[in-house]
Amino acid sequence: MTSSAELFATARKLMPGGVNSPVRAFGSVGGVPPFMVKASGPHLIDADGNQYVDLVCSWGPALLGHAHPAVLAAVHAAVDNGLSFGASTPDEGKLAALVMDRIPGVERIRMVSTGTEATMTAVRLARGFTGRDLIVKFAGCYHGHLDGLLAAAGSGLATLAMPGSAGVTAATAAETLVLPYNDVAAVEAAFAEHGERIAAVITEAAPANMGVVTPGEGFNAALSRITAAHGALLILDEVLTGFRTGYAGYWGLTGAHEGWTPDLFTFGKVIGGGLPTAALGGRAEVMDYLAPLGPVYQAGTLSGNPVAMAAGVATLTHATAEVYAHVDAASLKLQDAVAAALNEAGVDHSIQSAGNLFSVSFGTSEHGVHNYAQAQAQQAYRYAPFFHSMLSSGIYLPPSVFEAWFLSAAHDDAAMNRIFEALPAAARAAAQA
Ligand code: PMP
């Protein structure tokens, strides 16, 4: 078979950077990205025949583990009936009902194909509903690559140290207010000054694109209170956290008990079980502003695609309380093991978590990481040697210090032990950086 090195050399002549999504190019860690040919359970296999324990899990979707038999069976059955009809299908309602059963605040839902489309539509809908133009976002939060939300956007922009994107007009950028994360006073000040023009605040339910950052106690609740007081909407972006940090996403761990509900949620990743599906949902009064009922237009040739719906229905059906208990427990064990290895090697670090999501930052133990400025100020250079040591031991980590680590229900003792065994050498490599 052609090696990853040869495939990457060819790909670089065919695609910008050799990739179809920037972080895959290994820009910040260096080296040749392994080209993957197969995934099963907790494992990835590359074109060179190496098997890795996967801690990326397709950036979230593979909650049940790769190629879960029930999901594959559902997809095979759907494929046999045809790939796309351009008309409504029974499974769209099934997936909608599964989401609504978990999250009562989703009174209506619209399926789209990517997380970017979900947040883009949510923003347009918020503007259409309120008749206002400004959007508030937080530095370090990533909501996809829509023009208006690319400023200080975390994820691949953090990895590439880009403050924003070329190609976004000044007029568009001026309609986004970027505030520091975890800073309620900054939100109150923005509303005091611009309250009558703010259509919505959009926030990651728990930020995981500047590394993981724990929302301060009551931060999301304060956003809900402030937006409501000013007639603006709260858009809770659960593209990454939804159906991963628990049965009802991160909202289920927080808002469900604290007594707040966003006006709109966005979902992606797990909801499609590995196929391109995402969604926005929320209050019926707001959602019914979407066409064909309302004046806010949105549409999609492949929206609600029957194969993707089958994968989503099977995935949510099998994402039981036991699955979340397993992923939560595995996450805690791994966080402890990483901390122990780094402590043993004398590497200053902190581990930030939100539910079962976590990431490691270097040189941050004094203050932790509560916002983007602190995330950017860390000793990021320690990550590349840590990453490559793990990779050479057969552990596939996210190729950027600004991304979360993902586990699945398929990460069994054997897979976890392989990770634990690899950690001491990686910690020593980080210490020497
Ligand atoms: N919102 C969040 C919180 C995300 O993490 C992502 C992607 N990582 C997106 C939106 C965009 O989703 P997509 O890549 O499917 O467009």
Image (spheres, rainbow, N blue to C red):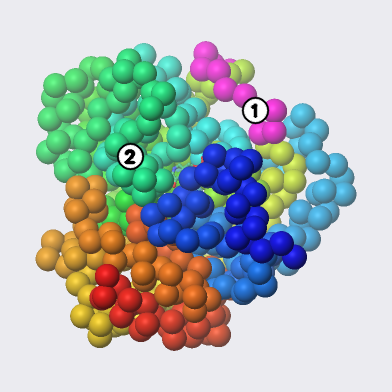
Side of 116 where 4 appears, left or right = right
Nearer-N-terminus badge (1/2): 2
Q: Which mark is residue 300?
A: 1
**Amino acid type assigned to the residue bearing label 1 in the image:** Gly
**SS at badge 2:** loop
Q: Which mark is residue 170?
A: none
One can see residue 374 in this view = yes
Side of 28 where 247 appears, left or right = right
**Image label count:** 2
In the rendered image, which quarter is residue 261 located in? top left
User: Secondary structure of the magenta portion, mostly?
Assistant: loop
The residue under label 2 is: 162
**Amino acid type assigned to the residue bearing label 2 in the image:** Met
Residue 393: give x, y in percent of width and height.
49, 79
Cα separation between marks 1 and 2: 30 Å
Task: Inspect the magenta stretch and tell me whether residue 325 lies in it.
Answer: no
Residue 135: give x, y in percent of width and height.
31, 26
Residue 84 to residue 310: above or below: above
Residue 176: give x, y in percent of width and height.
30, 25
Query: What span is colored magenta in the figure?
Result: 293-303
Residue 153 to residue 284: above or below: below
The N terminus lies in which quarter of the figure?
Answer: bottom right
**Neighbourhood count class around disc 2 (C-alpha, 10 Å): few under 14, some 14–19, many 20 upward:** some
Q: Residue at x 21, y 80 (%)?
A: 346
Q: Residue at x 48, y 45 (%)?
A: 22
The C terminus lies in which quarter of the figure?
Answer: bottom left
| Closer to the camera in the image, 377 or 143 | 377
Q: Residue at x 54, y 68 (%)?
A: 54
Residue 391: give x, y in percent of width and height.
48, 71
